[in-house]
Amino acid sequence: MTDQPSFPSVGRSTAFAILGFALAACSGGLSLPLFEANESGYIPLAQITGTLTVRGPCLVLVKRAGETTNLAWPSPGTAWDPEVQTITVDGVQVSTGQEVTLIGGEVHGLADDGIDWLTTPLDECATGNLWAVHIISEEGANPPEP
């Protein structure tokens, strides 16, 4: 029998925190707040529609009336491509400059008991309204690449 190398085990929240840090580091200077997706199957079903926009280090939604809403993204399942400025959530991809409908719910501050943060928003990305995205509506989303 040969000795197998042993590796330290990491808890789920530690693994998600590492993933969140790696995603933030690879986001091309963009702050991409991540929260742990709820495995209970409960998803807030409120909708918000606007144009996905990069403002400074923040990825925000600008509504037709001009109001800006800061966004937080679920993990696992979120990927940001800084080269083409697209974000994908569970296989649904949208681009900055595109009008999108996001399904989720408003977060009432960073201390909201319903959110387990993996990477918290930067101060400038957490002012005003903060929306926890759970799903990107497929209507109007970018078609998948072949």
Image (cartoon, rainbow, N blue to C red):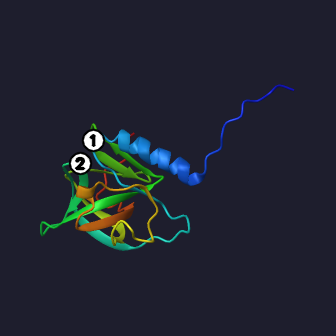
Front-lying residue, 70 or 79 = 70
Say few, some or many: other residues with alpha carbon within 10 Å of mark 1 (under 14 / 14 to 19 / 20 or more).
few
Q: Quadrant of the N terminus?
A: top right
The residue sitting at 47% across, 45% down in the picture is: 19
Q: What residue sits 36% from the left and 71% below the top?
A: 105
> Quadrant of residue 30 in the image?
top left
Q: Residues within 10 Å of mark 2 (few under 14, many from 20)?
A: some
Q: Where is residue 40 drawn, in percent x and y?
A: 56, 69
Task: Tell me the tag on residue 38.
Answer: none
Q: Are marks 1 and 2 in contact (CB under 8 Å)?
A: yes
Q: Position of residue 21 (x, y in %)?
A: 42, 44
Secondary element under disc 1, as helix, strand or loop, is loop
Secondary structure under tag 2 reads: loop
Cα distance between the residues tagged 1 and 2: 6 Å
Name the residue tied to disc 2: 57
Q: Amino acid at mark 1?
A: Gly
The spot of residue 93 in percent (x, y) is 35, 50
Placement of 87 over or under 101, stated as above or below: above
Residue plotted at (33% across, 69% down)? 109
Q: Is residue 64 left or right of residue 72?
A: left
Q: Which residue is mark 1?
A: 29
Q: Residue at x 54, y 47 (%)?
A: 15
The first of marks 1 and 2 along the sequence is 1
Q: Residue furthest left?
A: 65
